[in-house]
Image (cartoon, rainbow, N blue to C red):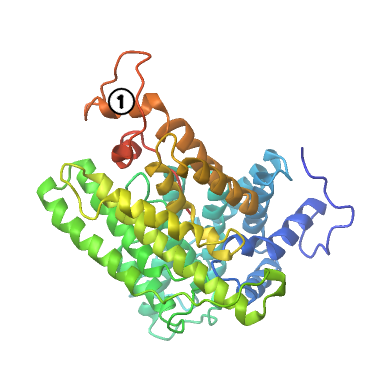
């Protein structure tokens, strides 16, 4: 049942009607809780964001309405038509904006920063990616949008370098850096479980992403990445390596040493995480500000560890022709321990879809892990209302855990199936190859 609209929605501002007013209010008050791993400084992002939304002829306004409507549709508040109408309107505006620009050259640099590479335009592009995640779209829908946003950021950097300080350009707000990090986050989790090379290469991370995270005080969670920045960069490298192996573009003998190096890096980054801080137990409503910060940081530590373990398991399961060390089953036990240390009511839980999905792939019929994974994903959806979570749960139930699909794996690499009615238990050894073969292009953001 749809939730009725409030009789007295908040002040409309730029909203044209009561529905748009509801969407803007929802975005400003609630959506940041589902996006940022550490919410302490989110107002520093929201305030400049809303300033762009309230500008006359704002490009960000239709994009924000589309993203907010998509989330309210996923939450059962709005009809699908409400979300899709606003999505199409926002997409048309962004496309028109980008098409109006002409490429700048070193011989004729622009005097003013072109609008299509402004931070408002970049933010609008990020909204288009975010709403597809909310709607549970597959990554083949996300990737062109990610490439478009990357092109905007690359062009902005090229123009500012070419102008050498002579460019009329307002000083960017914190929002630009946040959106660059959000782009990296969305790209990273479009690379697994169906392995693919990330759109953002190592140079983009070095030039655009890592300088932003380097500004954080040592050991302090990043607003977007928490304490998982290093893990996220390595997930892209792991996905690239697995894609090359399964796609046949790299020899198998080259895979083992490259995998070993990545496994060492993931384990080392996990060891470098801060140690959790423990204090006396008290209910969240009774916690002091300091105690809440400790709880948030502890959750971010566990989330980073979970990402390291999930990605190590992913690498090990990609090629089972040799007896791997460490054993994936042992890492899965550690993964479960890390997941349960990220309380569902913490902001770090917004980062946990990939680790929980990987644990689900490692679970066998009759294992207590399977009902735990189902319940955890259901709790995550109840909190976040992002349809990519339900798509991931459906994929586990109907593809990864399905007897017939797993039986094909037992038939060998040619995918040959056995006679109808023959049964087999799910075995976790083949899930990475199954995701690749069946093109399970899920988004784990």
**Foreground residue among 334 and 166:** 334
Find disc 1 in the rendering and name its residue: 408
Say above or below: 217 vs 196: below
How many numbered marks, from 0 up?
1
Q: Nearer the viewer, residue 425 or 361?
A: 425
Q: Position of residue 45 (x, y in %)?
A: 60, 73
Does residue 301 lie above or below 340 as drawn? Answer: below
Q: Is residue 379 left or right of residue 167?
A: right
Binning the other alpha carbons within 10 Å of mark 1 as few (below 14), some (14 to 19) or many (20 upward) gives some
Does the rendering let one see residue 118?
Answer: no
Of the 4 image quadrants, the one containing the N terminus is top right
As helix, strand or loop, the secondary structure at mark 1 comes to helix
Q: Nearer the viewer, residue 414 or 352?
A: 352
* Picture coordinates of residue 271, whole percent (x, y): 33, 72
Q: In this rendering, would 171 be left or right of 20?
A: left
- Quadrant housing residue 93: bottom right
320 relative position to 167: left or right: left
Residue 22 rendering spot, x and y as whole percentages: 77, 56
């Amino acid at each position: 049942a749809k939730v009725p609209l409030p009789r007295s929605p908040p002040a409309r501002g730029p909203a044209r009607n009561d529905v748009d007013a509801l969407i803007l209010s929802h975005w400003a008050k609630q959506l940041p809780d589902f996006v940022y791993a550490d919410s302490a400084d989110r107002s520093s992002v929201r305030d400049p964001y809303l300033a762009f939304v309230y500008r006359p002829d704002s490009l960000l306004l239709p994009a924000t309405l589309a993203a907010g409507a998509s989330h309210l549709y996923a939450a059962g508040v709005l009809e699908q038509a409400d979300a899709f109408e606003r999505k199409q309107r926002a997409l048309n505006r962004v496309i028109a904006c980008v098409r109006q620009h002409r490429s700048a050259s070193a011989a004729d640099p622009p005097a003013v920063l072109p609008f299509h590479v402004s931070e408002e335009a970049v933010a609008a592009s990020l909204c288009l990616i975010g709403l597809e995640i909310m709607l549970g779209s597959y990554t083949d829908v996300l990737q062109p949008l990610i490439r478009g946003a990357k092109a905007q950021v690359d062009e902005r950097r090229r123009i500012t370098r070419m102008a050498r300080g002579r460019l009329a350009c307002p000083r960017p707000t914190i929002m630009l850096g946040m959106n660059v990090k959000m782009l990296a986050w969305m790209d990273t989790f479009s690379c697994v479980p169906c392995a693919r090379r990330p759109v953002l290469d190592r140079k983009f991370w070095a030039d655009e992403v890592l300088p932003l995270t380097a500004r954080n005080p040592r050991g302090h969670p990043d607003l977007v990445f928490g304490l998982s920045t290093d893990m996220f960069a390595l997930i892209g490298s792991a996905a690239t390596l697995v894609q090359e192996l399964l796609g046949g573009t790299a020899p198998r003998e080259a895979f083992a040493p490259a995998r070993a190096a990545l496994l060492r890096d993931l384990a080392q980054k996990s060891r470098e995480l801060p140690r959790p801080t423990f204090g006396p137990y008290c209910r969240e409503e009774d916690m002091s500000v300091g105690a809440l910060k400790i709880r948030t940081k502890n959750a971010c530590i566990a989330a980073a560890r979970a990402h390291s373990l999930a990605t190590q398991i992913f690498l090990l399961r990609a090629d089972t022709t040799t007896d791997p060390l460490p054993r994936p089953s042992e890492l899965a036990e550690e993964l479960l321990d890390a997941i349960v240390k990220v309380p569902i009511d913490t902001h770090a839980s917004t980062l946990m879809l990939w680790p929980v999905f990987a644990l689900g792939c490692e679970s066998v019929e009759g294992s207590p892990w399977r009902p735990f994974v189902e319940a955890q994903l259901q709790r995550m959806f109840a909190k976040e209302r992002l349809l990519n979570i339900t798509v991931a749960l459906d994929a586990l139930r109907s593809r990864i855990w399905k007897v017939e699909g797993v039986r094909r794996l037992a038939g060998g690499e040619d995918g040959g199936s056995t006679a109808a009615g023959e049964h087999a238990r799910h075995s976790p050894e083949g899930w990475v190859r199954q995701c690749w073969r069946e093109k399970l292009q899920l988004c784990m953001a």
